[in-house]
């Protein structure tokens, strides 16, 4: 039961049916519940009663402040006695989304009210952030010295050195928060660092990550009941001392995970104090895994879309892919373009759920060392990710730390670089060829990788120039010439093949052009050579619109062949090609047509032939007259050549040349098409036939704007596909 529910149950407050107004029952005061500040005041009022132990008779709201403007009222006042003659605590309440500058103004307003009422203490709160002050014992402008950990509880005369303690002994335990509240906290904290442009948003995000890291590390430190947490502001503590304490926390965490953050905290003491105000009350470790994960991803997603133009795979699609695969705690899983780590996190959650299932079946007790080891060993040893952006890679690590681990093997590197270089530069021996059981990924679409910038293109089969096998036989061309450029998604197909072990499965989001465009036939041929096609699931056009991308896409599931199987497939295909090409109606026919076209074009049109015949006749006549010298002959031939050159520039000649080329090219292409059709028929007959799961998902749970539809066909497809893959694995 939350505070509001408890307040209603105990008849302290009443909220009307349309939730537009709230009544403080003991005070008989009614206010607009639609006002965001009223939400904060209601919760603060109930906290004072339930958490701090003050009787309702000691509390009043909207208290007139003497010696202030007539309209100036204190939001809440707690008195020392029931006659309400001696103000004890003044509370100033503000809406949750208040800016940092507005919060500082509220502090000044609160001090004005507290001093006018001769109150002992002041609390200023937005619900997301709370500052408490000792008003009596310090001069009005000594705000930092005034700052205390918390207001006193009922009957407490001594100010606590710390508010948050283990198990809440002599203080309060950290609290779990909802997804929406945590999202707001992250956003408010980021905005406080960004400060409307004072700092680059990316830098603000990075610094916030560092403090979240400190917060998580602090929560994991073993401490006795009643021992205070370090990630909080102590009473009378200078902000410089707080920063020093957090830097020590940061260094401890960084010593264990040096790859998460490579640079120091770059915030001022006052900035650190601000962020601690937002993060200190919450218990990230105890907050529901899904809630804190979604909160971080929501905040992170909106930030990266705005700042870096990064688009993350919708959770629905990520879940579908992971649900479709029989991933267990022994599987080794990779995302070579992991972004914020969404695919890896879902794989981790899947194994964590398997651990819960095992516990339910009696293999071990839930939350026992065996239960923890079941999923945590998988997280620590079997999950791998590569992300080219260092900022996003670090964010992926933080995302996984927030989800309780799995960040160890996430590295920042160009995922298309050689595996040896990735392993050497990262010093992570887990990145090996033919190692991974499952690859789950949505690589970037449309990026053009240039050979001039990335020489590794020449190491890819799909990085070499595409030459049709018929043309290759006709012209005996070099098939090892690197392309000038290649699209990133095509190279990632081959990179995934390199990483997969034989029998391993990759699931990859690809643009439909790879499956349908005639120019991508060579890619499809390569796939047939290297993989058994397990499934193709077509996604709706709107699948990625809500995240800022509109490319029509599908998810392709491929099982890697062994090298032997690939060699057999290619050998069969090459034999079919050779046998067919040698048949008179195909190869020889094409060669004959090519030769005939070349001869006709070389001979030229009627005009050129006439010029050449005139030249021959004229030379013969001169020779008969005895006037043909070598000089004259050269001159006549030169003049004829000039005439031919001039003619070749005419529209009539160019039209004739094009007509001849078109005529023969059409005849040649007709033979080639017939050859290709026969080839495909032979391939179908001679290569192993197998079943492929094909599915079209029209409704995947959300529309183009990202609004939920209440239906998700991917759930049904995933169940069928999982059964299909499990059957294949068992063969």
Image (tube, rainbow, N blue to C red):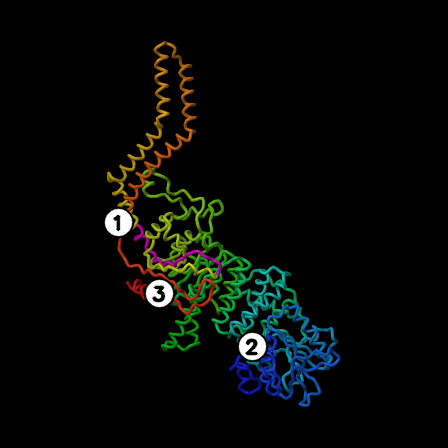
In contact (CB < 8 Å): disc 3 and disc 2? no
Please state which of the two labelled residues, at mark 2 or mark 1, is closer to the viewer.
1
- SS for tag 2? loop
Mark sitting earlier along the chain (2/1): 2
Neighbour class for label 2 at 10 Å: few (<14), some, many (≥20)? many
Please state which of the two labelled residues, at mark 3 or mark 2, is closer to the viewer.
3
Residue hosting label 1: 681
Q: Is residue 367 left or right of residue 536?
A: right
Q: Is residue 426 above or below residue 278?
A: above
Quick check: can you spot residue 315?
yes
Q: Position of residue 37 (x, y in %)?
A: 61, 75
Viewer-side residue, 491 vs 432: 491
- Quarter holding residue 111: bottom right
Q: Is 304 a magenta residue?
A: no
Report the magenta residues as a range.
547-567
Mark sitting earlier along the chain (3/2): 2
Mark sitting earlier along the chain (3/1): 1
- Quarter holding residue 224: bottom right
Neighbour class for label 1 at 10 Å: few (<14), some, many (≥20)? few
Q: Is residue 674 above or below residue 4?
A: above
- SS for tag 1? helix
Viewer-side residue, 600 vs 694: 600
Q: Which mark is residue 174?
A: 2
Q: Which mark is residue 717?
A: 3
Dividing the image into 4 quarters, which one contains the C terminus?
bottom left
Q: Is 552 a magenta residue?
A: yes
Quick check: can you spot residue 220?
no
Q: Position of residue 445 (x, y in %)?
A: 45, 54
> Going by the picture, which residue comes out furthest to the bottom?
83
- CA gap between label 3 and label 1 equals 30 Å
Viewer-side residue, 643 vs 369: 643
């Amino acid at each position: 039961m939350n505070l509001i529910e408890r307040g209603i149950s105990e008849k302290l407050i009443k909220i009307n049916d349309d939730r537009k107004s709230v009544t403080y029952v003991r005070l008989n005061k009614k206010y607009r519940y639609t006002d965001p500040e009223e939400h904060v005041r209601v919760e603060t009022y109930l906290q004072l009663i339930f958490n701090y132990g003050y009787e309702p008779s000691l509390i009043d709201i909207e208290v007139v402040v003497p010696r202030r403007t007539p309209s100036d009222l204190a939001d809440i006042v707690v008195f020392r006695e029931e006659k309400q003659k001696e103000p004890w605590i003044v509370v100033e309440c503000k809406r949750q989304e208040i800016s940092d500058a507005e919060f500082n103004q509220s502090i000044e307003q609160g001090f004005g009210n507290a001093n006018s009422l001769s109150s002992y203490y002041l609390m200023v709160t937005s619900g997301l952030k709370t500052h408490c002050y000792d008003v009596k014992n310090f001069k009005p402008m000594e705000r930092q010295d005034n700052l205390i950990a918390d207001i006193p509880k009922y009957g407490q005369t001594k100010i606590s050195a710390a508010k948050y303690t283990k198990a809440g002994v002599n203080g309060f335990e950290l609290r779990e928060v909802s997804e929406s509240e945590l999202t707001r906290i992250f956003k408010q904290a980021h905005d406080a660092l960004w400060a409307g442009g004072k700092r680059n948003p990316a830098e603000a995000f990075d610094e916030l990550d560092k403090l979240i890291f400190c917060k998580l590390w602090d929560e994991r430190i073993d401490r006795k009941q009643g021992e205070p947490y370090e990630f909080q502001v102590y009473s009378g503590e200078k902000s410089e001392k707080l920063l020093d304490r957090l830097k020590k926390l940061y260094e401890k965490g960084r010593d264990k995970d040096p790859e998460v953050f490579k640079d120091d905290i770059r915030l001022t003491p006052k900035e650190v104090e601000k962020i601690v105000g937002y993060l200190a009350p919450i218990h990230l470790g105890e907050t529901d895994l899904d809630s804190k994960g979604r909160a971080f991803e929501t905040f992170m997603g909106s930030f990266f879309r705005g700042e870096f133009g990064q688009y993350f795979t919708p959770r629905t699609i990520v879940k579908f892919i992971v649900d479709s695969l029989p991933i267990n705690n022994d599987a080794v899983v990779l995302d070579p373009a992991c972004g914020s780590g969404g695919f890896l996190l879902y794989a981790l959650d899947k194994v964590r759920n398997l651990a819960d299932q095992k516990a339910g079946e009696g293999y071990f007790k839930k939350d026992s060392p065996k239960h923890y080891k079941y999923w945590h060993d998988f997280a620590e040893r079997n999950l791998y990710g590569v992300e080219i952006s260092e900022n996003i890679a670090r964010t992926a690590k933080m995302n996984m730390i927030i989800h309780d681990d799995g960040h160890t093997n996430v590295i920042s590197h160009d995922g298309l670089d050689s595996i040896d270089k990735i392993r050497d530069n990262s010093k992570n021996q887990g990145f090996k060829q033919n190692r991974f059981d499952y690859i789950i990924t949505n690589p970037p679409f449309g990026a053009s990788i240039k050979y001039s910038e990335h020489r590794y293109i020449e190491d890819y089969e799909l990085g070499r120039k595409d030459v049709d096998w018929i043309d290759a036989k006709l012209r005996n061309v070099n098939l090892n010439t690197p392309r000038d450029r290649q699209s990133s998604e095509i190279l990632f197909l081959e990179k995934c093949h390199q990483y997969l072990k034989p029998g391993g499965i990759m699931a990859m989001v690809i643009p439909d052009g790879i499956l349908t465009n005639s120019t991508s036939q060579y890619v499809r041929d390569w796939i047939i050579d290297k993989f058994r096609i397990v499934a193709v699931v077509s996604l709706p056009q709107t699948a990625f619109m809500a995240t800022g991308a509109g490319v029509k896409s599908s998810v392709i599931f491929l099982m890697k062949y062994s090298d032997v199987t690939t060699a057999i497939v290619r050998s069969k295909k090459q034999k079919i090609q050779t046998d067919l090409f040698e048949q008179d109606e195909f190869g020889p026919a094409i060669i004959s047509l090519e030769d005939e076209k070349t001869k006709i074009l070389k001979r030229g049109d009627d005009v050129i032939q006439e010029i050449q015949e005139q030249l021959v006749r004229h030379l013969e006549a001169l020779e008969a007259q005895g006037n043909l010298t070598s000089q004259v002959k050269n001159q006549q031939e030169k003049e004829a050549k000039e005439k031919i050159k001039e003619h070749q520039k005419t529209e009539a000649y160019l039209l004739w040349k094009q007509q001849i080329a078109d005529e023969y090219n059409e005849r040649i292409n007709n033979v080639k098409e017939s050859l290709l059709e026969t080839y495909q028929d032979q391939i179908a007959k001679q290569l192993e036939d197998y079943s492929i799961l094909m599915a079209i998902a029209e409704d995947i749970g959300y529309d183009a704007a990202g609004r939920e539809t209440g239906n998700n066909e991917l759930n049904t497809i995933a169940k069928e596909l999982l059964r299909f893959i499990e059957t294949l694995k068992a063969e």
